Structure formats: C-alpha cells, structure tokens
C-alpha cells in the first residue's frame, strides 16, 4: 500500500507541477505550486522523513507561498491577454525537455551510476534509530537559535523589508490636487 500511495502522490506532484507551468493565470499557477509542494511533503512522510515533511508544509507551502500569493495579487494587472496560449512554443519546449531528460537517464544508466541489481539489506551500523533523529533535530534547532541566530534574524528582516517594499510599490500614486 505505501508504494501505491507514493506513486499516487508522485503523480499528483507531477500533475500539479504541469498545472503550474501550463497555466496562464498566476493565481492558478501558485495554487498548482502549493499542491506540488504538499505532494512532495506527502512523499516525505511516506519515506519516514517526518521532519522534512513538516518543514516542507510549514515553510514552503505555508509561509513562502503566502508571500508569493500576496505579491501576485498586489502586482497582477487585471487586464487579461487577448491572444491564446502559445501551444507550438510549449510543445517544442516540452519535446526538448523530454529529449534532455531521456538523455540524462541514458547517461546515468550507461555510466553505471544506476545499479542493475536491487539494493540489499541495510547494514546494522546504518540502520535508522529514531532516538538519533530526535536528538539531531533538537541539536539542529538549538544550533539554529544560538550560534546562527544573527543570520536567521537578518534573513527574517530582509523578508520583512521585501514585503514592505512590494506593498509600497504596488500602491497607486497619490494624485495631488493643485
């Protein structure tokens, strides 16, 4: 069952990513990106990487995409384009992408980077110990909020300045009555 769920969420992620790329509406593209990020988080959960899945949802699908949606809604022009979607250019780009992707897969298989046999059992010294993960996550958080507190605060301040700048740029100029 987990393999079927993994394939389902991987297909959902690919479908949402294609919606992101092919949509003409910026808000629809952003919603497709949110769905793709949630699909990636679900795959992280199925791979027992709970910390990465929660970070994916909280940081990317939550905070960053809310900022993207604010920027899109503040800066989007309401006039829609009269011309249709450039299907020929999109088809050419898609064909080039698949050609390059097939070439990359062939290169990996030809070089021997992808083994022909299935992987064996995990050695005992590399087995996953949940206690080590909890300790590592706690250590990561402690290090982030002690040694790297200043860079974290600077990054938060830069995001705040960027948001204020976008809001101030998106306002209509005030007309002065003379």
Image (cartoon, rainbow, N blue to C red):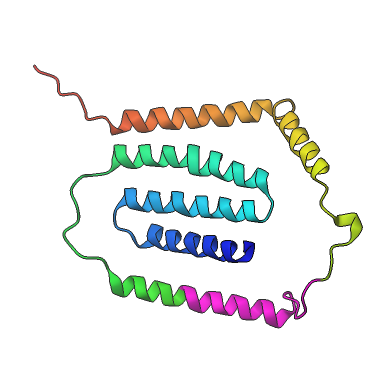
Q: Is residue 103 left or right of residue 120?
A: left
Q: Tell me the residue at 41%/41% (across/down).
A: 68
Q: Quadrant of residue 21?
A: bottom left
The tally of labels here is: 0
Residue 46 counted in the magenta span = no
Task: Report if residue 111 lies within the magenta region.
Answer: yes
Camera-side residue of 28 and 122? 122
Question: In the figure, 98 relative to 122: above or below?
Answer: below
Q: Is residue 38 left or right of residue 104?
A: left
Among the 4 quarters of the image, the one containing residue 149: top right
Q: Which stretch appears magenta? A: 97-119
The residue at 23%/44% (across/down) is: 77
Q: Position of residue 155 (x, y in %)?
A: 57, 32
- Residue 167 coordinates in the image, percent (x, y): 34, 30
In the image, farthest residue toward the top? 178
Q: Position of residue 123 (x, y in %)?
A: 89, 61
Q: Is residue 96 above or below residue 73?
A: below
Given residues 138 and 150, the one toward you in this image is 138
């Amino acid at each position: 069952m987990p393999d079927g769920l993994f394939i389902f969420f991987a297909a959902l992620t690919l479908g949402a990513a294609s919606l992101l790329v092919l949509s003409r509406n910026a808000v629809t593209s952003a919603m497709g990106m949110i769905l793709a990020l949630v699909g990636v988080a679900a795959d992280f959960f199925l791979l027992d990487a709970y910390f990465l899945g929660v970070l994916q949802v909280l940081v990317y699908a939550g905070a960053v995409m809310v900022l993207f949606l604010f920027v899109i809604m503040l800066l989007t022009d309401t006039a829609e384009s009269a011309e249709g979607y450039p299907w020929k250019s999109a088809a050419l780009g898609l064909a080039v992408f698949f050609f390059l992707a097939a070439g990359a897969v062939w290169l990996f298989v030809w070089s021997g980077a992808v083994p022909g046999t299935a992987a064996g059992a995990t050695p005992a010294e590399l087995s996953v110990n949940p206690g080590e993960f909890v300790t590592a996550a706690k250590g990561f958080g402690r290090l982030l909020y002690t040694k790297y507190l200043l860079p974290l605060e600077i990054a938060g301040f830069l995001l705040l300045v960027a948001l204020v700048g976008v809001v101030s740029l998106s306002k209509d100029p005030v007309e002065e009555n003379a």
